[in-house]
Image (tube, grey):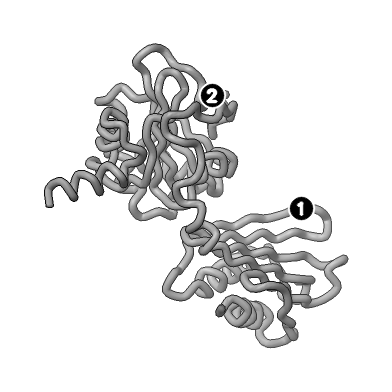
Amino acid sequence: MRQPALVAASVGHLHHGGIQATVGGAEGKSHFSLGNSNTMHRIAIDVGGTFTDLVVSHANGSARTLKLLSTPDDFSRAIVEGLERLLRDGTIDPASVGSLVHAFTVATNALLTGKGPVVGEAAPVLDVTTLEGAPLSIGKALAKGRKQLLLFVSPHCPLCKDLIPIAKNFARREKLDIVFVGDDDPSEQQAMIARLEMGGMPFVNGPMVGRVFHVDRLPHAVLIGDSGTVLSKGLVNSREHLESLITAHEMGVVSVQDYLANSKSKVA
């Protein structure tokens, strides 16, 4: 496993070689003690298959979070980029870092794929608030014949910017109540909403919905029926995939990927 080495390199970069870093802990998790953590701020880093998350906890109790796309060719690149950004904006001072904790959850996320609410069963009922401050219910019963489409996106997801305009037209045509869901800096979400003309459509920002539905890769969609039942779900990156959400439900297939795989095998 390269995790301790890659984080040690990142910490060395952060401190410009001025502080010794010691490695310890189980495989997949490393802890670096850099100073008196009672009076200095702490950095926690989680590297996942899609995103790399950094959290800086200050001695006064405040915290700063940063989310970046992971770099699978070399996971240390995202870590270094994140640390550099935190240095540039003044969030961290190399001389004031007390400790750094790092977790590598790519393998864990792979095991979670396909988990979450089961197709054909009731969706979790969540009362959330949109970016505009409006209350919104996810998974509750709708008017007869209506369906709710949850589309998980991010301004850092290249596929999402192409899919969102397609999804807007698809939802309008199919008379779906579309809800965009993300977990990024609100200002970045607002910029994406303005850029892709998503104003007037509900956008929920925060980790809760994604965790409940076990979303670990993007773009991801969940289709919920008028009774609050999960009809279909899966990764989506094209109009064909969105249409497959409807077809998968009508054919009784568990996911978009299952439907597409079955379709290809029949053609073959």
Please give left or right for residue 33 compared with residue 103 in the image: right
Instruction: Give the structural element (helix, strand or loop) at label 2.
Output: strand
Which residue is label 2 attached to? Answer: 137
192 or 111, nearer to the observer: 111
- Residue 127 appears in the picture as rendered: yes
Q: Residue at x 65, y 83 (%)?
A: 12
Mark toward the viewer: 2 or 1: 2
- Residue 199 appears in the picture as rendered: no
Q: Quadrant of the N terminus?
A: bottom right
Q: Residue at x 37, y 34 (%)?
A: 232
Which residue is label 1 attached to? Answer: 62
Give residue 241's position: percent from left, percent from top. 27, 42
Name which of mark 2 and mark 1 comes first in the sequence.
1
Q: Residue at x 44, y 47 (%)?
A: 114
In the figure, 148 relative to 205: above or below?
above
Q: Quadrant of residue 132?
A: top right
Please give left or right for residue 107 compared with residue 18 in the image: left
Instruction: Give the structural element (helix, strand or loop) at label 1.
Output: loop
- Assess disc 2: are there few (<14), some (14-19) or many (≥20) residues with their C-alpha within 10 Å of its C-alpha: few
Give residue 115's position: percent from left, percent from top. 49, 45
State the separation of the CA atoms marked 2 and 1.
30 Å
